[in-house]
Image (cartoon, rainbow, N blue to C red):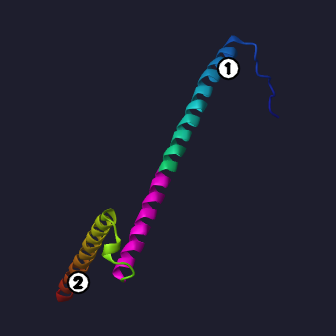
Amino acid sequence: MMNNKLIQTNGIWYKIKRFLKKIFWHKKSFKSNEESSIEIKENFTFSNNLKNKFETEHKKQILANKLLYGEIGPSELNDQEIDEMTEYFKKDIQNIDNELLRTKQHILYMQKELKK
């Protein structure tokens, strides 16, 4: 059987320990709540920024598709939209070039492997 001894709460060391525990435990608890609220705010702003970025990219993609399929003409766009579409198509062309270069390098690598 276990010895059930009562914890003495009238001792000086117990009172000092309890006092220090109250002081430091509450500060840690407050800090962790404060840090977690800051982290939540940062995550929220990050997700909002990410959401806004995807929405603008989606709008650009829709506008680019309308331009490509002739649903709208370049004369129907304002100056800002023209600049955005120019950058969008330059980036798209660069991505296609990078993909072609990667494919070409892969084909050359496979040819070298076959010659060995």
The kind of residue tagged 2 is Ile
Q: Secondary structure at mark 2?
A: helix
Q: Which comes before the other along the chain, label 1 or label 2?
A: 1
76 falls in the magenta region:
no
User: Contact, CB < 8 Å: mark 1 with mark 2?
Assistant: no
In the rendered image, the quadrant that contains the C terminus is: bottom left
What percent of the width, then of the height, locates residue 3? Answer: 80, 29
In the image, taking residue 37 as reference, residue 112 lies left or right, namely: left
Report how far apart the C-alphas of labels 1 and 2 lie in the structure: 73 Å
Q: Which quadrant would residue 15 be assigned to in this image?
A: top right
Query: Which mark lies nearer to you, 1 or 2?
Result: 2
What percent of the width, then of the height, locates residue 106? Answer: 24, 80
Residue name at image x 62 percent, y 27 percent = 26
In the image, taking residue 87 as reference, residue 28 lies left or right, namely: right
| Viewer-closest of 1 and 18 | 18
62 falls in the magenta region:
yes
Question: Which portion, as a residue range, is magenta?
Answer: 46-69
In the image, taking residue 35 as reference, residue 69 lies left or right, namely: left
- The residue carrying mark 1 is 18
Badge 2: few (under 14), some or many (20 or more) residues near its Cα, within 10 Å? few
In the image, taking residue 35 as reference, residue 103 lies left or right, namely: left
In the rendered image, the quadrant that contains the N terminus is: top right
- The residue carrying mark 2 is 107
